Image (cartoon, helix red, strand yellow):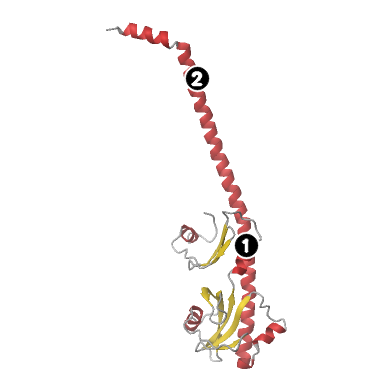
Amino acid sequence: MPSIRQMLESYRSKFPLENVAVAFFCLALIGIVLAVTMQRIRFERSETIAAVVKQNSNLAIAFEEHTVRTLKGIDQALQLIKHRYEQEGLKLILHKLVEDGEIDDSIFIGLGVDNEHGKRVLGRDDSKVINVADREFFTFHRQQKNDEMFIGKPALGRITGKWAIHMSRRINKPDGSFGGVVVAAVDPGYFTQFYRQTDLGAQGLVLLVGLDGIGRAKLAGEKGSFGDDWRGSSLLVEQAKGPVGNL
């Protein structure tokens, strides 16, 4: 059985010390290169995220301005009809407001007035009689006395047969009691069509979602949709922490 000295002499003869030193040097160099590379990757990742956050923030501002501008225009039309109906009642000729240019109905699928029982009494198509007493926007205004525009979830229109986002305002009788609603139906595609003006790429996503968690409009790549349920999603969880931020 060889002694320890013999084993060491045999190891030295097979692996000279200068070779071992070179091996350790190479390993150290590889470690340094790897550390520098990982540091560079972390830096580039943070730079990429910062650039994307800035780009998305700019896009969000543009989309927000378009949404706010659209909602204000719709609300102005609703308030005009509400005021005129409270003054004139059934004498109001709705389509004349459009013909005279007082209302731009280019983004509306439907526009009308429903009385306190939910019956459509004024509309662009007065030939169709419907009742909306069970609709979300109608029950909201019947129960709430505050003066604000209601933005509903996408629903299928009973006159047009098309999916629409219904936006409405409460109508009051002279004594302040509930007198019905004025409602406008807007195509969700109106919003996604605007989003298409920006090249978001095949993986791009723009979502217009209410604080109730229901999407009003979505563009994923080139596919537009609406009505997705985002309640409980990380998006709404983060939004609840503050009105402004990024995820």
From this viewpoint, which residue is outermost toward the left? 1
Front in this rendered view, residue 5 or 61: 5
Q: Residue at x 65, y 58 (%)?
A: 198
The residue singled out by tag 1 in the image is: 195
Q: Is residue 107 visible?
A: yes
Residue lying at 58% horizontally and 48% vertically, measured from the top left: 50
Placement of 1 over or under 122, stated as above or below: above
Mark 1 or 2, which is nearer the eye? 1
How many numbered circles are shown?
2
Instruction: Report helix, strand or loop for mark 2.
Output: helix
Where residue 5 appears, x then y in whole percent?
33, 6
Q: Quadrant of the N terminus?
A: top left
Between residues 139 and 130, which one lies in front from this camera angle? 130
What secondary structure is marked by label 1?
helix
First in sequence, mark 1 or 2: give its number.
Answer: 2
Name the image quarter holding residue 20: top left
In which image quadrant can residue 41 be found? Answer: top right
Residue position marked by numbered label 2 in the rendering: 25
Image position of 75 (left or right of 152): right
For the question of whether residue 149 can be seen, the reply is no
What's under tag 2, amino acid-wise? Phe
Residue that appears at 64% across and 79% down:
77
Q: How many other residues sit within 10 Å of disc 1, few (<14), some (14-19) or many (≥20)?
A: many
Q: Please, what is the three-letter code of the amino acid marked with disc 1? A: Tyr
- Percent of width and height locating residue 123: 60, 86
Q: Position of residue 158 (x, y in %)?
A: 53, 81
Tell me: 97 left or right of 36.
right
